[in-house]
Amino acid sequence: MKVVIPYKKSSAKSRLSSVLTPEEREEFVEIMLNHVIDSVREAGIENIDILSPSMYGLENMKKARVLLDKSDLNEALNRYLGQTEEPALIAMADLPLLSPDHIKAIISTKEDVCIVPGRGGGTNILFVKNPSCYRVKYYGSSFLTHCSIAAESGHNIEIYDSYFVGIDIDEPDDLVELLIHGKGYAKKYISQKFRLEISRGRVRLSQI
């Protein structure tokens, strides 16, 4: 099987610009990408592709093959799926709480398609056993869209409901979840810049 990870380092994570500089955001997304790759490899999968519009930040990548595609995310992924004859897993690059056990559970599904929803209606991981017969449509409420695409194309669906895999890092509040639940380098990186502010209300992010 194959794993493909869409990734862009340049101007990454603009919604974190209120708390991280451009340089910090680039460092952070690279750490998260490596975490996702390591989780996949530790799950026993070696065939990993990074789909990116640029080689920026990937010049020395040795853990995975880099495929360049300057197209829109959906166009690039659908082209990739159309050329893939074995099961394929699409994993977003910003999942710092992902573990090898999550990957193993997802790919062990008995259904044709396994979808991992992200918070806010997105799709964090999508596993398709017959990728050449499936098309993706990210952005917006992509989780509901991907469920509809699967149903309309006659694919059986499993929803893998995981709090940890459902956490992707887009907004400053997402960093709170990383500081609470994280264990790896992504948490260590953010812990050097922020701490948790605990009061009677919600736990909040506070700069050190």
Image: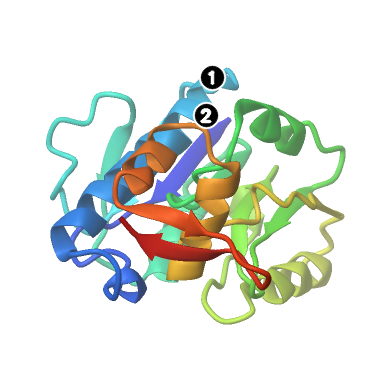
Colour mapping used in the image? rainbow
How crowded pointer 1 is (Cα within 10 Å; few <14, some 14-19, many 20+) is rated as some
Dot 1 falls on a residue whose secondary structure is helix
Dot 2 falls on a residue whose secondary structure is helix
- Residue 69, relative to residue 202: is it above or below? above
Residue drawn at (32%, 51%) of the image: 29
The residue pinned by badge 2 equals 39
The residue pinned by badge 1 equals 42
Q: Left of 87 or right of it: where is 152?
A: right
Residue 148: x and y in percent read: 77, 74
The quarter in which the C terminus is drawn is bottom left
Residue drawn at (39%, 67%) of the image: 73
Which amino acid type corresponds to the residue marked 2 in the rendered image? Answer: Ser
In the foreground, 25 or 180: 180
Q: Residue furthest bottom?
A: 140
From where the camera sits, is residue 111 visible? yes
Residue 107: x and y in percent read: 71, 34
- Residue 179, relative to residue 200: is it above or below? above
Residue drawn at (76%, 51%) of the image: 113
Q: Left of 77 or right of it: where is 110?
A: right
